[in-house]
Image (cartoon, rainbow, N blue to C red):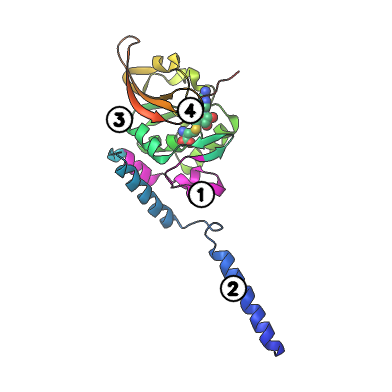
Amino acid sequence: MKGWAIWVILLLAVLGLAACVSSSPSTLPAAPAAYAEQRQRMVAQIAADGVSDEKVLTAFRSVPRHEFVPPDMVPLAYADRPLPIGYGQTISQPYMVAYMTELLELKGGERVLEIGTGSGYQAAILADMGAEVYSVEIIPELYEQATARLRRLGYPVHTLRADGYYGWEEHAPYDAIVVTAAPDHIPPPLVQQLKVGGRMVIPVGPPGLYQTLWLVIRREGDQVDMINKGGCVFVPFTREP
Ligand code: SAH
């Protein structure tokens, strides 16, 4: 073969390799429009699974879930499953976040307490719906990451690093409380920090097994109505030593 032909073949091989590398889906971030399309599909799935509150679905169409997962999880950000976020914790499955949010029956402007900030995704959904959000996280690194992320993305969420068993007394009472890790009993301080008529959604049960999702409605005195909303699986509610 002539010398120049070998050079042409070599050049084509290098160009081909470069094209392969640059078109590999996991190495390049998708365009914003692609994420919007993935969100539409995720919302269609959540709606098909029974969530009908338009305010909730609108928030899910707007909050960029891919910004709340670690870089290697971005390709799975819009799959209807929980994903690891480090420190043994997870960002909850989109359907579960939507269902719990719907159970709070928010109209906009309510004061909402979240226990378990994690990635900050649930807090961002609540803020997008116009709630005044207070969120407590026990793991310092997750608290710091989520606080920085929420600020960078422009969600006005108040965050605190503490054991959420005690709620966040300073800003109580709350119209609604959402707990995103599972204790083995309902922390009494959370009931006390709920307004009369206020709603709390909380998974309760043994760690590492299935738990029960409860809708707790505060009544006069320390009375509550407890409504069983079915089985669920959450990371354990941990306690400060
Ligand atoms: N709402 C989160 C889900 C995170 S998983 C999201 O949208 O990503 C549950 C979180 O609860 C974890 O980050 C875990 O560290 C936190 N957690 C567990 N026990 C807690 C406690 N006693 N107080 C505050 N946060 C707690």
Q: Residue furthest bottom?
A: 2
Kindly indicate whether the residue at mark 2 contacts the one at mark 4 (C-beta within 8 angstroms).
no
Inter-mark Cα distance, 1 to 4? 28 Å
Q: Nearer the viewer, mark 4 or mark 3?
A: 4
Assign a secondary structure to mark 3.
loop
Q: In the rendered structure, which segment of residues is drawn in magenta?
A: 56-83
Counting other residues with Cα less than 10 Å from the Cα at mark 3, is it few (<14), some (14-19), or many (20 or more)? some
| Residue 13 falls left or right of residue 66 | right
Q: Amino acid at mark 4?
A: Leu
Counting other residues with Cα less than 10 Å from the Cα at mark 2, is it few (<14), some (14-19), or many (20 or more)? few
Q: Amino acid at mark 3?
A: Glu
Query: Would residue 167 be visible to someone looking at this image?
Result: yes
Question: Can you identify the residue that label 4 sits on?
Answer: 209
Q: Earlier in the sequence, mark 1 or mark 4?
A: 1
Q: Earlier in the sequence, mark 3 or mark 1?
A: 1
Q: Is 198 or 72 nearer to us in this picture?
A: 72
Residue 74, numbered label: 1
Q: Is 199 or 233 nearer to us in this picture?
A: 233
Q: Earlier in the sequence, mark 1 or mark 2?
A: 2
Give the percent coordinates (x, y) of residue 148.
Answer: 54, 38
Q: Amino acid at mark 2?
A: Gly
Kindly indicate whether the residue at mark 1 contacts the one at mark 3 (C-beta within 8 angstroms).
no
Assign a secondary structure to mark 4.
loop
Give the percent coordinates (x, y) of residue 100.
Answer: 37, 32
Q: Earlier in the sequence, mark 2 or mark 3?
A: 2
Question: Can you identify the residue that label 3 sits on?
Answer: 105
